[in-house]
Image (cartoon, rainbow, N blue to C red):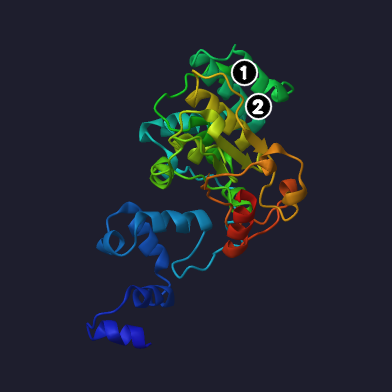
């Protein structure tokens, strides 16, 4: 084997060559174990911690092949979105919430709705008329008494979105392309947006509202959002009510698939609006059929549709 000969001659070899040698000698498991224990210089300098974690999540061997038939789209594992967490000390709280939801077999919509009401009560706006009007369409959702007694962290950018993203299985997120944008990225993308003259902002794949929360607007009626995930839309509405808690308004966030090929014919006020700014993180790689999802992987096609709808 040429790669072994190179190592024997003490010649410089690439990372790819080392990987091939490990696979050939069937010693990749030892390397992965060493990497996880952080005791191997090879692991510290060649294999990153995130790479090792990805191998574990996907049951992958050192050469990238899956050791089982499992893959991302079939994975039932949950992976905490560490990049979306503002305070890492909240990880234990997050895990406890997920355990409670699982142990009591609570529907995720009920869980998010219950926790959302807690946030609205803590902000002192739950009894307001506009809040009641916003939540009226969710009146048939059951509340959970146990979750309603939880003290939620007040140092997270989007605690409901964080809980929801953590709850979703990796396979489901991969199928639907549901990965939310961290605060830092959303803020960087929206910081230069100017809405001082009544301009309108729109996110056609708003998720839990990362861009909606980041855009520098003083008037909530300048902000619009759409998503094909009903739970995400609920979260976005609650987040907007919390952000503009001193203003009486109904969040202009709608549950529909804006990127669907037939969306031009959908009946909704959103399609009669023209927008000055559009920023979004579309569901890349999603291929589900929920709520008339159509696969639009061609970025030119997506950009063209957004352009046509905004002029």
Q: Quadrant of residue 28?
A: bottom left
Seen at 46% across and 59% down, the residue is: 55
Q: Is residue 51 above or below residue 270?
A: below
Q: Position of residue 162 (x, y in %)?
A: 50, 36
Which part of the image, by quadrant, shows the N terminus? bottom left
Q: Is residue 298 left or right of residue 57?
A: right
Q: Is residue 214 left or right of residue 302?
A: left
Mark toward the viewer: 1 or 2: 1
Q: Residues within 10 Å of mark 2 (few under 14, many from 20)?
A: some
Frontmost residue, 28 versus 138:
138
Frontmost residue, 112 versus 12:
112
Residue at the spot of label 2: 110
- State the SS at label 2: helix
Q: Total of numbered circles in the picture?
A: 2
Q: Is residue 35 above or below residue 127?
A: below
Q: CA distance from mark 1 to mark 2?
A: 21 Å
Residue at the spot of label 1: 130
Q: Position of residue 168 (x, y in %)?
A: 58, 42
Q: Position of residue 163 (x, y in %)?
A: 52, 34
Q: Residues within 10 Å of mark 1 (few under 14, many from 20)?
A: some
- State the SS at label 1: helix
Sequence order check: which comes first, mark 1 or mark 2? 2
Q: Could one spot residue 105 in this view of the protein?
A: no
Q: Position of residue 169 (x, y in %)?
A: 59, 45
């Amino acid at each position: 084997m040429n790669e072994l000969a190179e190592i024997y001659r003490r010649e410089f070899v690439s990372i790819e060559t080392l990987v091939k040698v490990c696979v050939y000698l069937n010693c990749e498991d030892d390397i992965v174990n060493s990497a996880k224990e952080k005791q191997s210089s090879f692991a510290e300098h060649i294999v990153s911690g995130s790479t090792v974690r990805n191998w574990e999540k996907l049951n992958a061997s050192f050469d990238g092949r899956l050791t089982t038939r499992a893959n991302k789209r079939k994975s039932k594992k949950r992976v905490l979105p560490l990049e979306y967490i503002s305070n890492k000390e909240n990880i234990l709280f997050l895990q406890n919430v997920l355990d409670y939801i699982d142990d009591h077999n609570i529907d995720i919509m009920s869980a998010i709705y219950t926790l959302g009401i807690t946030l609205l009560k803590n902000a002192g706006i739950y009894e307001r008329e506009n809040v009641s009007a916003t939540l009226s369409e969710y009146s048939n959702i059951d509340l959970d008494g146990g979750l309603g007694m939880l003290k939620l962290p007040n140092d997270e950018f989007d605690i409901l979105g964080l809980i929801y993203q953590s709850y979703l299985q990796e396979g489901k997120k991969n199928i639907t392309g549901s990965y939310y944008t961290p605060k830092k990225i959303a803020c960087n993308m929206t910081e230069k947006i100017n809405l001082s003259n009544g301009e309108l902002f729109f996110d056609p794949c708003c998720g839990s509202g990362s861009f909606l929360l980041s855009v520098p607007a003083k008037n909530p009626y300048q902000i619009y959002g759409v998503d094909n995930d009903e739970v995400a839309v609920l979260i976005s509405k609650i987040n907007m009510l919390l952000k503009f808690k001193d203003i009486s308004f109904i969040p202009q966030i709608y549950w529909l698939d804006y990127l669907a090929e037939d969306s031009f014919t959908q009946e909704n006020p959103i399609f009669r609006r023209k927008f000055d700014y559009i920023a979004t993180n579309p569901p890349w790689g999603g291929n589900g059929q929920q709520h008339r999802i159509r696969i639009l992987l061609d970025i030119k096609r997506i950009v063209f549709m957004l352009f046509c709808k905004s002029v």
